[in-house]
Image: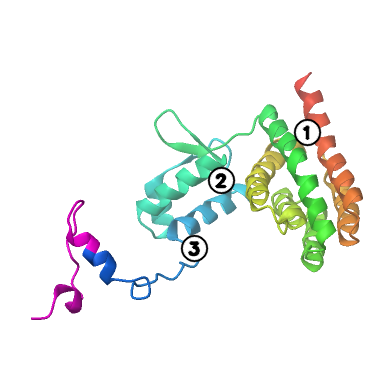
Amino acid sequence: MASNVARGRRLPLRRGDPSAAWYTKLVTPEQAPVLPPLGRSTTRSDLVAASIKSAILAGRLHPDELLVERRIADQLGVSKTPVREALIALTSSGLLTPTRNRGVAVRRMRPEDVQHVYEMRMLLEPWAAGQVAAAGTLDVAEARRALEDAARFVEADDHAGLSLANRRFHRLLYSTCANELAVRSLDDLQDLTALGTVSLLWEQWPTWRTELEEHREILTAVQEGRAADAEELLRGHIQRSIIRLREFRAR
């Protein structure tokens, strides 16, 4: 009679079972199946999170607006489970905030919140952009397209579109940095920057034209591989917003 192993059946091994040693000797590393690594895939909850994030950063979902699982599920044609997972992820990233009734709402950025975001960016982003400048890994063509889009949004007075174009530009400055932890941290900070810029900063200070020119100077420095200059320009770019926020809070 063929053995269970030969038939391909699983042997119910228990701790202390003497057959376990026999089984281990029989199934050698060469015979054991090797699982291939799983590729990166986009889950349904990732797609839902991306849709919600896009609506928030584009201004279609407003600060303090409540997000209802069932309503979002109906709009996107999915079950409540991926919506719930997406809301949890966006709450963890800071774009959403819990409410008293155990729901979630779009986060309203206070001046101190925005200041803290910019302070964190100043610690990471100039360094990361300097790394990209030194390595010569910037996608220059895409960065130029982001600034061209930004210029069009400035002329159209489209602040939501401009905020997203600026986010694209800033991400290009650091996204090819070899430190993936820094990149992930900056991605979350850029989401909060986009949210705070439209809802607070640009309502107080219409600096978008000046910022566009500063972006062009930063791009030139990174493109030319002038890492120290790129870091200094980007640090000053971020620092000016911090100063304005500090002065605003001190009133």
- Callout 3 touching callout 1 (CB < 8 Å): no
List the residue tagged with mark 2: 61
For label 1, count other residues whose C-alpha is less than 10 Å away and answer few (under 14), some (14-19) or many (20+).
few
List the residue tagged with mark 1: 204
Q: Helix or strand or loop: what does disc 2 sit on?
A: loop
Q: Position of residue 79 (x, y in %)?
A: 35, 56
**Quadrant of the image containing the C terminus:** top right
List the residue tagged with mark 3: 42
Camera-nearest label, 2 or 3? 3
Pick the front one: 198 or 2? 2
Q: Separation of disc 2 and disc 1 at Cα?
A: 21 Å
Q: Helix or strand or loop: what does disc 1 sit on?
A: helix
Q: Position of residue 123 (x, y in %)?
A: 75, 38
Q: Main secondary structure of the magenta part?
A: loop
Q: Separation of disc 3 and disc 1 at Cα?
A: 38 Å
Pick the front one: 17 or 225? 17
Reading the chain from its start, which is encountered first: label 2 or label 1?
2
Residue at point 76%, 46% (across, down): 125
Pick the front one: 96 or 64? 96
**Quadrant of the image containing the N terminus:** bottom left
Residue at point 12%, 80% (across, down): 2
Q: Separation of disc 2 and disc 3 at Cα?
A: 23 Å
Q: Is residue 6 magenta?
A: yes
Q: Magenta part of the protein: which range?
A: 1-21
